[in-house]
Image (cartoon, grey):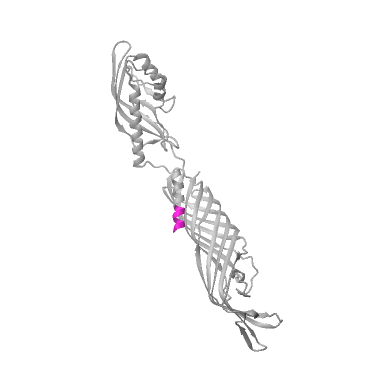
């Protein structure tokens, strides 16, 4: 469970990098930024007779409220029937030229539009309806006033580290909305599998009481998906796989002909109440497959099948048990036992850890699950996978099931197996990065 929790945490940290949602908390942050900037706009727009409205410092602060040099401001400082917008810098110069004696501005928010309009992969706009009151003493010795509704348009990126006014006008700013790229199936999949794993030995020719306890693994893979037809894609992948099993042999017994130090033939008998062997194998996988996925909707079921060619990376075993060794001499009709000096000890504890000799593995992999759309660029994957080995991965020449010939040695189970294969099955979690 700890492994699963760690993997899930890593995956969802990754997801948070890609996915962006306007939660209520983020909307409150946007609302606060809007109110703050409008207050700054109101303050920087107003000046008295003795205030140097056009100082370099004031100009910089005022310009910095806007998105760039091309941001525009409606001409609301002269009486006109036309709705004209000019660049913000020109607007400031117009104010300086015509209202040198004083200028008072008040702005009150009436409406903040939602949802926000997405205009690029990372940027959004929000239109804010305000009521603006403005009074200024014109250089031609008359009082000019403005008392109408305006629309202030803010532009910001989804991380909210850039938030500016891009336009102030009579009507809301309505640019072409951004159309997200279509998820046509082209993707890079990064996933982890959390399978039960089994190493299978064929010992059917022996009468042995053997049990196999599956192991647990955490495997990772990177798969490129290339669509070829509607809903059908080719998969190219690389990853790793780890298989482990714990074998228990109860009432182990073996007898076979042997020759002692005096070159006499006898029947050697080896037994143990319980023998335990733990095996683990690691592979580097190369995957080629096909996938069918329903191409529409937020929830896309998929099914895929692949051939996996795996190169062994590291394989090992640990075997241990308590053995009794006996020797029967038919020519004398005598059985020797409990004689350590003659290589026939009793209750001898034997253990060994060593490498396993493993060859390349060929398997068939089946996946069934769902892709869940999180954002334009990211889908979450949850599914079930089953991987069945097809080839014999043992590099040994088959021998008899003699686990311990001498009190100082232990021989791995795989040496006696007619065929050794692998199986894994379990949960897959991951992400598809839409390309």
Chain part drawn in magenta? 1-8
The mark total stands at: 0
In-front residue for pair 109/363: 109
Query: In the shown orientation, is residue 204 left or right of residue 116?
Result: right
Magenta-span inclusion, residue 3: yes
In-front residue for pair 170/218: 218
Outermost top residue: 140
Outermost right residue: 263
Query: In the shown orientation, is residue 323 left or right of residue 258?
Result: left
Q: Main secondary structure of the magenta part?
A: helix
Q: Is residue 153 above or below residue 215?
A: above
In-front residue for pair 198/60: 60
Q: Residue at x 32, y 33 (%)?
A: 112
Q: Is residue 219 above or below residue 125?
A: below
Q: Is residue 247 above or below residue 3?
A: below
Q: Position of residue 47 (x, y in %)?
A: 33, 19
Q: Position of residue 350 (x, y in %)?
A: 58, 72
Query: In the shown orientation, is residue 143 left or right of residue 353?
Result: left
Q: Position of residue 103 (x, y in %)?
A: 31, 18
The image quadrant of residue 86 is top left
Q: Residue at x 44, y 51 (%)?
A: 9
Magenta-span inclusion, residue 396: no
Query: In the shown orientation, is residue 419 left or right of residue 13?
Result: right
Q: Quadrant of the N terminus?
A: bottom left
Residue 96 is at least partly visible in this image: yes
Q: Position of residue 425 (x, y in %)?
A: 49, 61
């Amino acid at each position: 469970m700890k492994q699963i929790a760690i993997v899930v945490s890593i995956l969802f940290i990754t997801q948070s990098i890609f996915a962006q949602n306007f939660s209520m908390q983020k909307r409150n942050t946007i609302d606060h930024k809007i109110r703050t900037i409008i207050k700054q706009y109101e303050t920087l727009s107003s000046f008295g007779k003795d205030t140097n409205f056009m100082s370099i410092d004031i100009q910089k602060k005022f310009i910095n409220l806007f998105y760039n040099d091309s941001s525009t401001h409606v001409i609301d400082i002269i009486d006109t029937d036309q709705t004209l917008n000019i660049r913000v810098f020109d607007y400031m110069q117009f104010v300086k030229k015509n209202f040198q004696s004083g200028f008072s501005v008040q702005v009150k928010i009436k409406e903040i539009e939602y949802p926000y309009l997405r205009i690029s992969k990372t940027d959004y706009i929000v239109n804010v309806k305000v009521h603006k009151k403005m009074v200024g003493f014109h250089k031609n010795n008359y009082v000019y006033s403005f008392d109408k509704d305006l629309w202030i348009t803010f532009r910001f990126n989804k991380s909210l580290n850039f938030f500016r006014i891009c336009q102030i006008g009579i009507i809301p700013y309505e640019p072409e909305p951004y159309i997200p790229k279509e998820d046509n199936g082209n993707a890079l999949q990064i996933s982890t599998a959390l399978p039960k794993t089994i190493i299978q030995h064929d010992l059917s020719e022996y009468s042995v009481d053997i049990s196999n306890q599956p192991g647990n693994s955490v495997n990772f893979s990177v798969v490129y998906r290339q669509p070829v037809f509607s809903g059908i894609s080719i998969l190219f992948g690389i990853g790793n796989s780890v298989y482990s099993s714990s074998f228990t042999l109860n009432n182990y017994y073996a007898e076979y002909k042997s020759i002692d130090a005096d070159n006499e033939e006898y029947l050697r008998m080896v037994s143990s109440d319980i023998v335990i062997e733990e095996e683990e194998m690691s592979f580097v996988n190369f995957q080629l497959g096909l996938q069918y996925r329903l191409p529409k909707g937020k929830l896309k079921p998929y099914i895929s099948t692949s051939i996996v060619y795996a190169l062994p990376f590291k394989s090992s075993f640990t075997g241990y048990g308590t053995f009794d060794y006996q020797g029967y001499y038919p020519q004398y009709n005598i059985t020797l036992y409990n004689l350590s000096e003659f290589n026939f000890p009793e209750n001898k504890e034997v253990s060994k850890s060593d490498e396993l000799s493993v060859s390349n593995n060929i398997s068939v992999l089946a996946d069934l699950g769902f892709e869940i759309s999180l954002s334009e660029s990211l889908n979450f994957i949850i599914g079930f996978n089953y991987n069945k080995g097809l080839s014999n991965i043992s590099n040994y020449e088959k021998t008899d099931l003699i686990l311990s010939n001498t009190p100082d040695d232990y021989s791995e189970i795989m040496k006696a197996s007619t065929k050794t294969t692998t199986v894994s099955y379990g949960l897959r979690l991951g992400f598809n990065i839409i390309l």
